Amino acid sequence: MDFGLRQDQRMAQREARCFARREIAARPADRPADNALVGKMGQLGLFGCAFPEEYGGAESGFLTHSLVCEEISTVNSGLRPLFNLQGMTVPYTILQWGSAAAKERYVRSLVLGEKLGCTCFSEPHAGSDIAAIETTITACGDHFLLNGTKTWISNGHAADVALVYATMEPGSRHRGLCAVVVDTHQPGWSSRAIPKLGDHATPIAEIHLDGVRVPKENLLGDLGRGFTVAMTALDRGRISVASGAVGLAQACLDAAVEYARRRNQFGHPIATYQLIKGTIAEMVADVDGARLLVRRAAWRADQGQPFTREAAIAKFVAGETVVRAAGRTMEIFGGMGYSLDMPVERFYRDAKLYQIGEGTANIMKILIANDALGLKKANRSRPPNFAGTTDLA
Ligand SMILES: Cc1cc2nc3c(=O)[nH]c(=O)nc-3n(C[C@H](O)[C@H](O)[C@H](O)COP(=O)(O)OP(=O)(O)OC[C@H]3O[C@@H](n4cnc5c(N)ncnc54)[C@H](O)[C@@H]3O)c2cc1C
């Protein structure tokens, strides 16, 4: 693994940092993202790092995507889910698994921020256990019909395009699952906002699907093979999520260092006390460790090497790191950490999601342990990616 960054990667990182400090920091952090902001991010190329030029991308790879994601999350982690949806999960899954017509119709417009996307796995009775999905997909002439309920859908209220996972036969588990691309602006698609603790820049919704129509050309992969599509989407998504966790952990660390230097107690800055130094040292080591693991996973994805195991480790460690970092920052701030006038309370609220979304901490541990114990190899062979490289993820 090369620990240096290429010039294009450094440039993308710098550009994302400038944009985040200039445009994102100027907005109230809890204000939901709007089309204008998403459009600006798309035009600047922030979503396109991992995409081919013909789809509006820069062909710079997953590591570049990770660097950009980290920068955005450092300034506002609440925008990270939206960034992942636009810059990775939705368009990349269509790019890898979609028909020529679906790629043509959706990928570029998502990457450029002209359309908003969402991903619909979760249901009231299917969270960690995706194979328990109950939403049905039924063939009807030249299209499919979808019926069911999805929940916890980030951006679900505003999305123009949705990746929906549904089963041909409830109870058939992995075998019956299908993945399709859905145009949301049609009868039968409705959403209801769900109030939540943090990440307010990306609202979430419950989605009702009542006879929603999907052209057959919008099927991703083969009929009944949607579980494989889901696993590849989650692997890549975990790199994004872990990158965001590192970004927010860095924001916690920066705030803790700055406050410890200027807060005086007992006649000295609290930064001079060994217990505070110890906390800062542990935070630095945690964030550095998590960042290296995230970059290893992204680097392996760029090399076309298997990375399911590495993405799970990165996601698990980064999720634990950011929750610990937010708690420690709040401790260093003392009472001010509890104030609604400081960003620290937002860090605390936003951090927790990193142990839940894109596979909970427990699910990551199961994947990692099953691999270590020889029960289920994580880095198994998977179909080639869009470029036809040896993507064994
Ligand atoms: C803010 C937010 C945004 C989200 N965005 C999206 C989105 O855009 N699209 C989408 O599809 N979903 C989304 N989700 C849903 C998210 O992916 C799920 O919450 C997550 O997968 C966990 O599912 P669950 O909530 O049903 O928990 P459950 O699966 O019910 O798990 C509950 C607890 O049990 C544990 N558990 C479950 N199974 C096992 C096991 N076998 N062994 C040990 N422990 C286990 C879990 O780790 C967890 O601690 C979002 C969630 C949140 C909170």
Image (cartoon, rainbow, N blue to C red):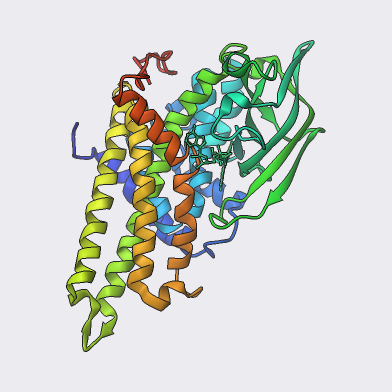
Q: Is residue 234 left or right of residue 148?
A: left
Q: Is residue 241 above or below residue 51?
A: below
- Residue 236 lies, in percent from the top left, at 43, 31
The quarter of the picture where residue 379 lies is top left
Q: Is residue 243 above or below residue 121?
A: below
Asked if residue 16 can be seen in this view, the reply is no
Residue closest to the eye, 366 or 115: 366
Residue closest to the eye, 362 or 306: 362
The quarter of the picture where residue 336 lies is bottom left
In the rendered image, the residue lying farthest to the bottom is 267
Identify the residue at horizontal 72%, vertical 22% (top origin).
Answer: 136
Q: Is residue 292 left or right of residue 312?
A: left
Q: Quadrant of the N terminus?
A: top left
Identify the residue at horizontal 24%, vertical 40% (top origin).
Answer: 7
- Residue 25 lies, in percent from the top left, at 46, 62
- Residue 202 lies, in percent from the top left, at 57, 50
Q: Quadrant of the C terminus?
A: top left
Residue closest to the eye, 43 or 21: 21
Identify the residue at horizontal 44%, vertical 43% (top origin).
Answer: 46
Asked if residue 245 can be seen in this view, the reply is yes
Q: How many marks?
A: 0
Identify the residue at horizontal 40%, vertical 17% (top origin).
Answer: 387
Ligand 1's quadrant is: top right
- Residue 9 lies, in percent from the top left, at 29, 40
